Image (cartoon, helix red, strand yellow):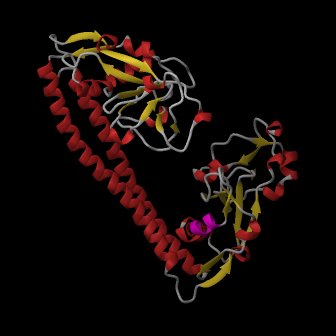
Amino acid sequence: MKNNWEIKKLGDVCDFQNGFAFKSSDYVDSGFFVMRIGNVQDGYISLSDPKYIRKSYKAFDKFILQSGDILISLTGNVGRVGVINEEHLPAVVNQRVARIILKDKNLVQKKFLLYFLSSSYFTEKLTEAGHGAAQQNISTKDIQNLEIFIPTLSEQKHIISFLDKAFANIDKIKNNAEKNLQNSKELFESYLQSIFENPGKDWEEKKLGDICDFVRGPFGGSLKKSIFKKEGYVVYEQQHAIYNQFTEVRYFIDEKKFNEMKRFKLKPGDLIMSCSGTMGKIAIAPDDIKQGIINQALLKLSPHDNLHKEFLKYWMESRTFQDDLKIYTKGAAIKNVVSVKILKEIKMLVPKIQEQRTIVKKINALFLETRRLEAIYQKKLLNIEELKKSILKRAFNGDL
């Protein structure tokens, strides 16, 4: 910070207004957009998962937002800041979100304030002022007591101009990296789909039930939390299929219970598929898997000798199978896969086992190359975010 910069409390520069505790039971299909914590993201307002409310509270007018209003999150990932614009209106501010209103635009430019609120200095100080272990909370009083460094208006304009240009260039680089990341994912998915959409002449049509053994996890009542132990035989869950990992385990059963439920035992080479909520995620049990059983939210598939386990996994991950799975899905709020009986009837075109091995080898090679490219683009995106933080830090250290 330069010597001629003023130091003031944010409460001297801005007014803060807490949102209103609107009742979720009052949400309607249309009306005023309720700006909740999840709508305030890093630097923008998200319109995902919209909730609406009609004008029905006495003090309603006080919480109506205007274009240009600055919002800040007060719970969880605290300090996220976004600006309201015309596409977000009409809208009201909800609890645990605050509106920030500049007192004197001749003292602090709004854009300068926004950049300051996005700086690592502010977010670090805000985190230090937060309360709560599991979920952090801050109050508007906490924010008011934090300091802001204020240069002259001409220097503020210089800083704003520099940051606008720098971030515009950075955003171009970021957009290109995001496109490249998406393209690499789509390349693999397209290649995978092309294999199953263009089968060889000698590929045979088979029902899944004729080339795999199916076991759906036990009814939930069979695995009550009261029977779980601190160690023993593993109870595999949806997370193991969704994240393709078998080492992080939460639940265990003893040997007696394991022997009672051996039908649900997971063996090396078996496939598991998530069957509730996040559906259709598939993983292959590794050779060194710990002994255990599947829970009620998983389906276990054991391929026969003439079906390569990885060929089956790739086919199940392709749109060919995933589209069929959506057709056979039931449940409104939480989706659930229908009965094993129906899944067994889904048809699959299968080449000879040797050709399956060749295809799997090619897919694996492209998969590894895709993952290598994705890692490069992910690292680039992380570096871009670090660069933005570094530039902001320089700006508010007075080094521009």
Residue 75: x %, y % from top left: 50, 25
Q: Would you place residue 363 above or below residue 229 in this image?
A: below
Q: Total marks drawn?
A: 0
For this orientation, the residue located farthest to the bottom is 201
Q: Which residues are magenta?
A: 322-327
Q: For this rendering, which residue is in front, 210 or 75?
A: 75
Q: For this rendering, which residue is in front, 114 or 168?
A: 114
- Locate the C terminus by quadrant: top left
Residue 326 belongs to the span the image colors magenta: yes
Q: Is residue 269 visible?
A: no
| Residue ID at (39%, 51%) | 375
Q: Is residue 84 left or right of residue 47?
A: left
For this orientation, the residue located farthest to the left is 154
| Residue ID at (53%, 68%) | 319
Q: Would you place residue 283 above or below residue 109 in this image?
A: below
Q: For this rendering, which residue is in front, 172 or 103?
A: 103
Residue 192: x %, y % from top left: 48, 70
- Locate the N terminus by quadrant: top left
Residue 145: x %, y % from top left: 37, 10
| Residue ID at (42%, 19%) | 17
Q: For this rendering, which residue is in front, 351 or 154?
A: 154
Q: Is residue 148 visible?
A: yes
Q: Is residue 361 left or right of residue 113?
A: right
Q: Considering the whole magenta stretch, tell me its main secondary structure.
A: helix
Occupied quadrant, residue 164:
top left
Residue 119 belongs to the span the image colors magenta: no
Residue 325: x %, y % from top left: 62, 65
